[in-house]
Amino acid sequence: MPASCHIPVLLKEVIHFLNPVDKGVYVDGTVGGGGHLKAILDTSCPTGIVIGFDRDINAINRIKDKFSQYKNRLTMINASFSIMYERLVQLGIPQVDGVILDLGISSLQLDDEARGFSFQNKGPLDMRMDASEEISAWHIVNQKTEDEIARIIRRYGEEKFSRRVAKAICKARLKKSIDNTVELAALIAEVIPKTRRHHPATKTFQALRIEVNHELDNLKIFLNSVPDFLKKGGRLGIISFHSLEDRLVKQRFKELSTGCICPRDMPVCGCGHKSVVKNIIKKAIKSGTDECAENPRSRSARLRFIERL
């Protein structure tokens, strides 16, 4: 598989549960390489409408060029999915038939050395999905205090050696700034014991990326707007790649699908709380053996789906 090849995760499962149909209106909130987007366009033809969101202007431009044949049915918006409802209202489409979010970083972004997302390639400490943002990973690594860096790595990377990494970073930058991905990864590898499963820098790089792009904050904002943008019977699917994301999604879906919350000994419901969605998947779907073999990056994917009542 070429390094630049984008393989959409859990594609068959997404299309099965999203069930795009002709005349429907659907949203891909994280278009990335366009794999899920194209499948939705193809299965909702000839008149289904698809709206794509992405913070990365490069992804927007790439999709516009690549999928020009769908221009009459496809609208691209350079914005975070966190403001999806607001932008849909502006378009005069306050409710849609289905939404999919793939919270993973695009393979095209990960393999682009200039973006600085991966420690596998030497690149600048950037990690911004939206290049217009002012704060990059470089600013965090070279300007935050040891306590702040440790907190970020512990909170968003769930790294038990966060203090050790933060201390090493602050010590190293006294001599010179830490400017590239390989340099930072090597520094981390010196202070964290090696494991067979992951490179020692994996959790720290995840934490920096989440902090730079406000990923969990944006997800929380989006989840708070559910189910406003879904029609009755409309479906929302979210693919997450680490426990912090999946925990937020699972908790919010549970809140929305829960009915009466009165104490069990109450003879009559007094809370008036009603479920507004139903979970159409009991447990999160994971990638199968074949998919993991073809696309190793899918190994940590978790897919959850709800339907508006």
Image (cartoon, grey):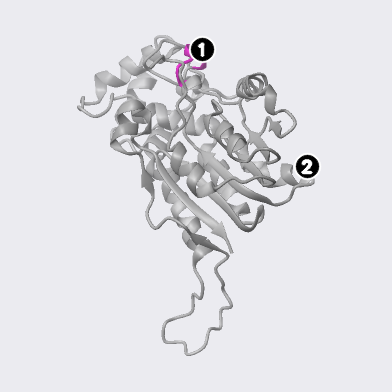
Q: In this view, does 167 lie above or below 262?
A: above
Q: Position of residue 69 (x, y in %)?
A: 69, 24
Q: Where is residue 211 in the image (x, y as percent from the top left)?
A: 50, 33
Q: Label 2's element?
A: loop
Number of dots carrying numbers: 2
**In-image side of 43 versus 209 (left or right):** right
Decide whether residue 2 is among the magenta residues: no
Location of residue 185 by image quarter:
top left
Q: In this view, does 197 lie above or below 98?
A: above
Q: Label 1's element?
A: helix
Q: In this view, does 278 lie above or below 135?
A: below
State the mark number for residue 114: 1
Q: Residue at x 59, y 64 (%)?
A: 309
Q: Is residue 260 above or below residue 115?
A: below
Given the image, on which type of amino acid does mark 1 rest?
Answer: Ala
Where does label 2 land, which residue?
Answer: 91
Decide whether residue 113 is among the magenta residues: yes
**In-image side of 68 versus 275 (left or right):** right
Location of residue 242 by image quarter:
top left
* Mark 1 closeness class: few <14, some 14–19, many ≥20 residues within 10 Å: some
Front one among 162 and 205: 205
State how far apart marks 2 and 1 are (Cα).
Answer: 34 Å
**In-image side of 29 versus 114 (left or right):** right
Given the image, on which type of amino acid does mark 2 rest?
Answer: Leu
Q: Which of marks 2 and 1 is nearer the N terminus?
A: 2
Q: Give the range drawn in magenta.
A: 110-115
SS majority, magenta: helix
Front one among 297 and 129: 297
